[in-house]
Amino acid sequence: MVALSARATNSVERSSIVCLLIAVYSTPDEASRAVAVGLEYLRELEIEWSPHPTAAEVRREQDGISSQLGVRGIEELVDLPLMRDAASLATLDVLTMSRCLIVSVCLSLELDQVADRRGRGAPLQV
């Protein structure tokens, strides 16, 4: 993958490789590596995010979204044109892969907790 990554000529190609790397590293043991790959890609786009954001950093992001939305209602947002910029769509792919990783790791941790409470190997009853 490293050799393939070196051959990427633009952010769209690079995002495809980053998505593959995130998928490869999407195990609980490699989750921090997957996060690092995603954050490195974002840094290349001059988007600085911390792997462990503080409450203040999260609040700043939320405030920025609120400022951009202003007083627009959901109805107005639905009517906005679809995003067509390939580089922006590629970045959304990386963010989506990262979100899926986070959800998977959270679920895995929760299932481990359930297994610990029930005793390892006990079937999970839904």
Image (cartoon, helix red, strand yellow):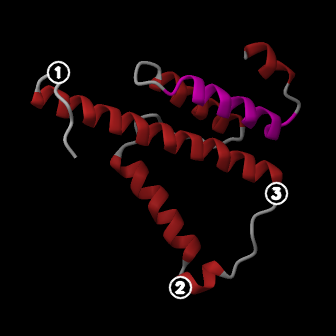
> Can residue 36 be seen at all in this image of the molecule?
yes
Q: Residue furthest top?
A: 3
Q: What's drawn in magenta, residue-wise?
A: 10-26
Disc 2 designates what residue? 73
Q: Are marks 2 and 3 in contact (CB under 8 Å)?
A: no
Residue 108: numbered disc? none
Q: How many neighbours does mark 1 have within 10 angstroms: few (below 14), some (14-19), or many (20 or more)?
A: few
Dot 1 amino acid type:
Arg
Whole-percent x and y of residue 10? 85, 36
Dot 2 amino acid type:
Gly
Disc 3 designates what residue? 85
Q: Nearer the viewer, residue 20 or 69?
A: 20
At x 35%, y 38%, the residue is 106
At x 42%, y 37%, the residue is 104
Alpha-carbon distance for marks 1 and 2?
49 Å
Majority secondary structure of magenta residues? helix
Disc 1 designates what residue? 120
